[in-house]
Image (cartoon, rainbow, N blue to C red):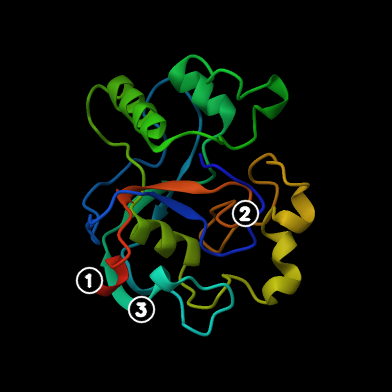
Amino acid sequence: GGASVGKETVSKKAPIPVAKTKAPSVSKTVVPPKILVEGLTKAEFVKIPAGKFLMGSDPAEKGRKEDEGPVHPVSLDEFWLGRTPVTWQTWNRVMGDYPKGLFNPELALHPVERISWNMAQKFMERLNKYAKGAKLFRLPTEAEWEYAARAGTQSVYFFAGGSDVLGEYAWIKTNSGEQTHPVATKQPNPWGLFDMLGNVWEWTWDGYDAEFYRSSG
């Protein structure tokens, strides 16, 4: 879950703001294709293939931030990623309740929002507890998230047509009413992942480092 909606941007991951940390650029954690906890949730995962990509955005890209460059190559092992953001329905099935004041039944299929990074860690801990301590679940790293979001493309968007057709793939400021919407109601990216653009910001596992793009690989 994240903290805001309707951002018209390809980069909507939300790394936890911890200074001077460096995350691993290669993942060794493999998550199974479906949540292992019997009877808990039917949320599905997508197998993301191993590969290399150019992480970061070009200096000429509109809306680019200084800490999103320079562009540099990154290699990743295969991993699994949730087909959609975590919904309130899934959160309730895992955690047994909802954070006070953040939920009403009409939002069951909406993505979780206004959840802190620490709360996301509690969610993962609970999943791993129910999975008999296998420790299979965690947030993706920033590199994993961007690799999955790009889905084999290196353009600003993972689809043709640019910002003219962005509303077909994402809930953004111009079509969302500045509210969340049910997951998987827009078109997925080429790897079958929904809501990789818009709807909510998403936490990543690693900490924020303004020099990360200059030192990771």
Residue 9 percent location from the top left of the image: 59, 64
Q: Mark 1: which amino acid?
A: Ser
C-alpha span from label 3 to label 2 = 24 Å
Dots 2, 1 in contact, CB < 8 A:
no
Pointer 3 and pointer 1: residues touching (CB < 8 Å)? no
**Residue bearing mark 1:** 215
Residue 39 appears anywhere in the view:
no
Q: Quadrant location of residue 135?
A: top left
State the residue in front, 15 or 96: 15
Amino acid type shown at disc 3:
Pro
205 to 115, vertically: above or below? below
| SS under mark 1 | helix
Q: Nearer the viewer, mark 2 or mark 1?
A: 1
Q: Residue 70, can we see it?
A: yes
Say few, some or many: other residues with alpha carbon within 10 Å of mark 3 (under 14 / 14 to 19 / 20 or more): some
x and y percentages locating residue 209 in the rendered image? 30, 59
Question: Mark 3 and 2 residues: CB-CB less than 8 Å, in contact?
Answer: no
* Residue position marked by numbered label 2 in the rendering: 198
In the rendering, at what x and y percent does residue 54 appear? 37, 76
Q: Nearer the viewer, residue 33 or 93?
A: 93
Density class for disc 2 (Cα within 10 Å; few <14, some 14-19, many ≥20) is: many
Q: Residue 34 is drawn in which quadrant?
A: top left
Q: Nearer the viewer, mark 3 or mark 2?
A: 3
Which residue is rendered at x = 31% and y = 70% of the image? 213
Q: Position of residue 198 (x, y in %)?
A: 62, 54
Which residue appears at 44% of the width and 19% of the height? 95
Q: Dot 3 lies on which element?
A: loop
Q: Is residue 105 above or below residue 66?
A: above
Q: What's the mark number on residue 70?
A: 3
Q: Residue furthest top?
A: 96
Q: What kind of residue is marked 2?
A: Gly
CA gap, disc 3 and disc 1: 10 Å
